Protein backbone atom coordinates (compact mmCIF):
# COMPACT_ATOMS: atom_id res chain seq x y z
CA UNK A 1 0.00 0.00 0.00
CA UNK A 2 1.25 3.47 -0.91
CA UNK A 3 1.89 5.26 2.41
CA UNK A 4 1.66 8.65 0.70
CA UNK A 5 -1.81 7.86 -0.60
CA UNK A 6 -2.95 6.69 2.83
CA UNK A 7 -1.56 9.83 4.49
CA UNK A 8 -3.26 12.01 1.89
CA UNK A 9 -6.61 10.31 2.50
CA UNK A 10 -6.19 10.77 6.27
CA UNK A 11 -5.38 14.45 5.87
CA UNK A 12 -8.28 15.18 3.55
CA UNK A 13 -10.80 13.27 5.64
CA UNK A 14 -9.63 14.98 8.81
CA UNK A 15 -9.83 18.42 7.18
CA UNK A 16 -13.39 17.79 5.99
CA UNK A 17 -14.76 16.36 9.24
CA UNK A 18 -12.82 17.86 12.15
CA UNK A 19 -14.57 21.27 11.99
CA UNK A 20 -17.97 19.58 12.43
CA UNK A 21 -18.96 19.65 16.13
CA UNK A 22 -20.98 16.46 15.76
CA UNK A 23 -17.93 14.50 14.53
CA UNK A 24 -16.25 13.04 17.62
CA UNK A 25 -13.49 10.95 16.05
CA UNK A 26 -12.07 9.49 12.86
CA UNK A 27 -10.12 6.22 12.89
CA UNK A 28 -8.25 4.44 10.13
CA UNK A 29 -8.80 0.72 10.43
CA UNK A 30 -8.54 -2.55 8.56
CA UNK A 31 -5.76 -4.05 6.50
CA UNK A 32 -3.59 -0.90 6.25
CA UNK A 33 -3.35 -0.92 10.05
CA UNK A 34 -3.10 -4.69 10.50
CA UNK A 35 -0.33 -4.89 7.89
CA UNK A 36 -2.22 -7.28 5.61
CA UNK A 37 -2.97 -4.82 2.80
CA UNK A 38 -2.13 -5.39 -0.85
CA UNK A 39 -1.46 -2.79 -3.60
CA UNK A 40 -5.16 -2.78 -4.52
CA UNK A 41 -6.55 -2.89 -0.96
CA UNK A 42 -9.20 -0.47 0.25
CA UNK A 43 -8.31 2.21 2.79
CA UNK A 44 -10.86 1.83 5.60
CA UNK A 45 -12.02 4.56 7.95
CA UNK A 46 -14.54 4.72 10.78
CA UNK A 47 -16.17 8.04 11.60
CA UNK A 48 -17.77 8.33 15.07
CA UNK A 49 -20.56 10.91 15.29
CA UNK A 50 -22.41 12.07 18.39
CA UNK A 51 -25.91 10.83 17.58
CA UNK A 52 -27.67 8.56 15.09
CA UNK A 53 -29.25 11.64 13.47
CA UNK A 54 -25.75 12.91 12.62
CA UNK A 55 -25.02 10.02 10.29
CA UNK A 56 -27.07 11.58 7.48
CA UNK A 57 -25.18 14.86 7.94
CA UNK A 58 -21.88 13.01 7.66
CA UNK A 59 -22.99 11.32 4.45
CA UNK A 60 -23.99 14.68 2.98
CA UNK A 61 -20.65 16.29 3.87
CA UNK A 62 -18.62 13.34 2.60
CA UNK A 63 -20.49 13.08 -0.68
CA UNK A 64 -19.94 16.77 -1.30
CA UNK A 65 -16.28 16.96 -0.37
CA UNK A 66 -14.54 13.59 -0.45
CA UNK A 67 -13.41 12.12 -3.77
CA UNK A 68 -15.86 10.33 -6.01
CA UNK A 69 -18.84 8.76 -4.26
CA UNK A 70 -19.72 5.24 -5.46
CA UNK A 71 -22.58 4.24 -3.18
CA UNK A 72 -23.29 2.30 0.01
CA UNK A 73 -22.56 -1.39 0.58
CA UNK A 74 -23.44 -3.15 3.85
CA UNK A 75 -23.65 0.22 5.60
CA UNK A 76 -20.23 1.37 4.36
CA UNK A 77 -19.83 4.49 2.21
CA UNK A 78 -17.72 3.73 -0.85
CA UNK A 79 -15.53 6.39 -2.47
CA UNK A 80 -12.71 6.24 -4.94
CA UNK A 81 -9.39 8.01 -5.28
CA UNK A 82 -6.85 5.98 -7.22
CA UNK A 83 -7.95 3.10 -5.02
CA UNK A 84 -11.19 2.48 -3.11
CA UNK A 85 -11.79 4.32 0.16
CA UNK A 86 -14.40 2.82 2.47
CA UNK A 87 -15.91 4.87 5.30
CA UNK A 88 -18.20 3.54 8.03
CA UNK A 89 -20.15 6.23 9.91
CA UNK A 90 -21.35 5.07 13.32
CA UNK A 91 -22.80 6.97 16.26
CA UNK A 92 -21.14 6.93 19.67
CA UNK A 93 -24.04 5.15 21.46
CA UNK A 94 -23.77 2.28 18.98
CA UNK A 95 -20.00 1.88 19.48
CA UNK A 96 -20.42 1.93 23.25
CA UNK A 97 -23.25 -0.62 23.00
CA UNK A 98 -20.91 -2.93 21.03
CA UNK A 99 -18.33 -2.73 23.77
CA UNK A 100 -20.82 -2.95 26.62
CA UNK A 101 -22.36 -6.14 25.26
CA UNK A 102 -19.29 -7.75 23.63
CA UNK A 103 -18.45 -9.85 26.69
CA UNK A 104 -21.94 -10.14 28.12
CA UNK A 105 -22.20 -13.75 26.95
CA UNK A 106 -20.50 -16.18 24.56
CA UNK A 107 -23.30 -15.52 22.08
CA UNK A 108 -22.66 -11.76 22.21
CA UNK A 109 -18.95 -12.30 21.66
CA UNK A 110 -19.52 -14.50 18.63
CA UNK A 111 -21.94 -11.94 17.18
CA UNK A 112 -19.86 -8.81 17.76
CA UNK A 113 -16.22 -9.87 17.66
CA UNK A 114 -15.81 -9.31 13.92
CA UNK A 115 -16.99 -5.68 13.93
CA UNK A 116 -15.10 -4.79 17.13
CA UNK A 117 -11.84 -6.30 15.85
CA UNK A 118 -12.18 -4.56 12.49
CA UNK A 119 -13.43 -1.14 13.59
CA UNK A 120 -11.78 -0.76 17.02
CA UNK A 121 -8.89 -3.14 17.70
CA UNK A 122 -7.35 -2.81 14.22
CA UNK A 123 -7.53 0.99 14.24
CA UNK A 124 -5.36 4.08 14.70
CA UNK A 125 -6.62 7.62 15.37
CA UNK A 126 -6.79 10.20 12.59
CA UNK A 127 -8.83 12.76 14.56
CA UNK A 128 -9.61 11.91 18.18
CA UNK A 129 -9.53 14.90 20.55
CA UNK A 130 -11.32 12.97 23.33
CA UNK A 131 -9.01 9.94 23.00
CA UNK A 132 -12.02 7.70 22.47
CA UNK A 133 -10.04 5.02 20.64
CA UNK A 134 -7.72 4.42 23.60
CA UNK A 135 -10.70 3.83 25.90
CA UNK A 136 -12.48 1.67 23.33
CA UNK A 137 -9.44 -0.54 22.71
CA UNK A 138 -8.88 -1.02 26.43
CA UNK A 139 -12.45 -2.32 26.81
CA UNK A 140 -12.18 -4.52 23.71
CA UNK A 141 -9.04 -6.23 25.02
CA UNK A 142 -10.46 -7.01 28.48
CA UNK A 143 -11.36 -10.58 27.50
CA UNK A 144 -12.84 -12.14 30.68
CA UNK A 145 -11.84 -15.63 31.78
CA UNK A 146 -15.44 -16.84 32.17
CA UNK A 147 -16.18 -16.04 28.51
CA UNK A 148 -12.91 -17.59 27.39
CA UNK A 149 -13.69 -20.82 29.24
CA UNK A 150 -17.26 -20.93 27.93
CA UNK A 151 -16.12 -20.53 24.31
CA UNK A 152 -13.43 -23.16 24.77
CA UNK A 153 -15.86 -25.60 26.40
CA UNK A 154 -18.50 -25.19 23.69
CA UNK A 155 -16.09 -25.46 20.77
CA UNK A 156 -14.21 -28.43 22.22
CA UNK A 157 -17.51 -30.28 22.75
CA UNK A 158 -18.39 -29.63 19.11
CA UNK A 159 -14.98 -30.85 17.93
CA UNK A 160 -15.22 -34.00 20.08
CA UNK A 161 -18.64 -34.74 18.57
CA UNK A 162 -17.29 -34.17 15.05
CA UNK A 163 -14.44 -36.57 15.68
CA UNK A 164 -16.76 -39.22 17.11
CA UNK A 165 -19.13 -38.97 14.13
CA UNK A 166 -16.34 -38.85 11.54
CA UNK A 167 -16.76 -42.45 10.42
CA UNK A 168 -20.33 -41.83 9.27
CA UNK A 169 -19.37 -39.02 6.91
CA UNK A 170 -19.75 -39.66 3.20
CA UNK A 171 -18.20 -37.35 0.61
CA UNK A 172 -21.12 -34.91 0.60
CA UNK A 173 -21.46 -34.85 4.38
CA UNK A 174 -17.74 -34.21 4.74
CA UNK A 175 -17.79 -31.28 2.29
CA UNK A 176 -20.76 -29.65 4.05
CA UNK A 177 -19.46 -30.05 7.60
CA UNK A 178 -15.77 -29.28 7.12
CA UNK A 179 -16.24 -25.45 7.19
CA UNK A 180 -18.07 -25.76 10.54
CA UNK A 181 -15.26 -27.90 11.94
CA UNK A 182 -12.65 -25.34 10.81
CA UNK A 183 -14.74 -22.54 12.34
CA UNK A 184 -14.87 -24.36 15.69
CA UNK A 185 -11.10 -24.89 15.63
CA UNK A 186 -10.60 -21.19 14.88
CA UNK A 187 -13.00 -20.11 17.64
CA UNK A 188 -11.20 -22.30 20.17
CA UNK A 189 -7.79 -21.08 19.03
CA UNK A 190 -8.67 -17.39 19.25
CA UNK A 191 -10.40 -17.84 22.62
CA UNK A 192 -7.35 -19.68 23.90
CA UNK A 193 -5.29 -16.59 23.03
CA UNK A 194 -7.92 -14.04 24.14
CA UNK A 195 -8.16 -12.66 20.62
CA UNK A 196 -11.21 -11.66 18.56
CA UNK A 197 -11.81 -13.61 15.36
CA UNK A 198 -12.64 -11.82 12.10
CA UNK A 199 -14.96 -13.39 9.56
CA UNK A 200 -14.88 -14.77 7.00
CA UNK A 201 -11.48 -15.83 8.39
CA UNK A 202 -9.92 -12.68 6.89
CA UNK A 203 -6.99 -12.70 9.29
CA UNK A 204 -6.66 -16.38 10.14
CA UNK A 205 -3.88 -17.18 7.68
CA UNK A 206 -1.76 -14.35 9.13
CA UNK A 207 -2.65 -14.82 12.81
CA UNK A 208 -1.90 -18.56 12.76
CA UNK A 209 1.81 -17.79 13.01
CA UNK A 210 1.33 -16.00 16.33
CA UNK A 211 -1.41 -18.06 17.99
CA UNK A 212 -0.69 -20.80 20.50
CA UNK A 213 -0.74 -23.72 20.12
CA UNK A 214 0.65 -23.55 16.61
CA UNK A 215 -1.95 -25.25 14.41
CA UNK A 216 -0.89 -23.77 11.08
CA UNK A 217 0.20 -27.05 9.50
CA UNK A 218 -2.82 -28.99 10.79
CA UNK A 219 -5.41 -26.45 9.69
CA UNK A 220 -4.00 -26.20 6.17
CA UNK A 221 -3.90 -29.97 5.93
CA UNK A 222 -7.51 -30.11 7.08
CA UNK A 223 -8.88 -27.56 4.60
CA UNK A 224 -6.89 -29.00 1.71
CA UNK A 225 -7.88 -32.59 2.34
CA UNK A 226 -9.86 -34.29 -0.41
CA UNK A 227 -13.17 -36.10 -0.21
CA UNK A 228 -11.96 -39.62 -0.98
CA UNK A 229 -12.17 -42.26 1.74
CA UNK A 230 -8.39 -42.11 2.19
CA UNK A 231 -8.40 -38.31 2.48
CA UNK A 232 -11.27 -38.36 4.96
CA UNK A 233 -9.38 -40.88 7.10
CA UNK A 234 -6.34 -38.61 7.02
CA UNK A 235 -8.57 -35.68 7.96
CA UNK A 236 -9.75 -37.54 11.06
CA UNK A 237 -6.15 -38.02 12.17
CA UNK A 238 -5.47 -34.32 11.67
CA UNK A 239 -8.53 -33.32 13.69
CA UNK A 240 -7.49 -35.68 16.47
CA UNK A 241 -4.10 -33.96 16.58
CA UNK A 242 -5.77 -30.52 16.67
CA UNK A 243 -7.98 -31.53 19.61
CA UNK A 244 -5.04 -33.00 21.48
CA UNK A 245 -2.95 -29.85 21.01
CA UNK A 246 -5.81 -27.56 22.06
CA UNK A 247 -6.43 -29.62 25.20
CA UNK A 248 -2.75 -29.67 26.13
CA UNK A 249 -2.57 -25.87 25.74
CA UNK A 250 -5.74 -25.29 27.75
Image (tube, rainbow, N blue to C red):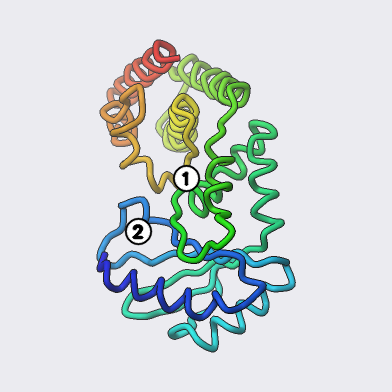
Ranked by sequence position, the earlier of labels 2 and 1 is 2
Q: Is 114 displayed left or right of 95 in the figure?
A: left
Do we see residue 226 in this rendering?
no
Secondary-structure class at tag 2? helix
Residue at label 1? 198
* Quarter of the image that includes the N terminus: bottom left
Residue at the (34%, 70%) spot, across then down: 7
Q: Residue furthest bottom?
A: 64
Residue at the (65%, 48%) spot, across then down: 98
Residue at label 2? 32
Q: Position of residue 49 (x, y in %)?
A: 64, 67
Secondary-structure class at tag 1? loop
Q: Position of residue 115 (x, y in %)?
A: 55, 51
Q: Position of residue 46 (x, y in %)?
A: 52, 63
**Which mark identifies residue 52?**
none
Between disc 2 and disc 1, the foreground one is 2
Q: Is 196 displayed left or right of 144 in the figure?
A: left
Residue at the (35%, 75%) spot, across then down: 8
Q: Is 178 displayed left or right of 238 in the figure?
A: right
Amino acid sequence: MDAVRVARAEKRLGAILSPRPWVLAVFRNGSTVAGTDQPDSDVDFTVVVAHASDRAKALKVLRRGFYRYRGIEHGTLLFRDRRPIDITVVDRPTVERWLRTLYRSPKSLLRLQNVVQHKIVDAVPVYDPQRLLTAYQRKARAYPERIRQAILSNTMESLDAALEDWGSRNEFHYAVELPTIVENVAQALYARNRRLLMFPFKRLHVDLKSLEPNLEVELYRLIRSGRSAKSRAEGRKVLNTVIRKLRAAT
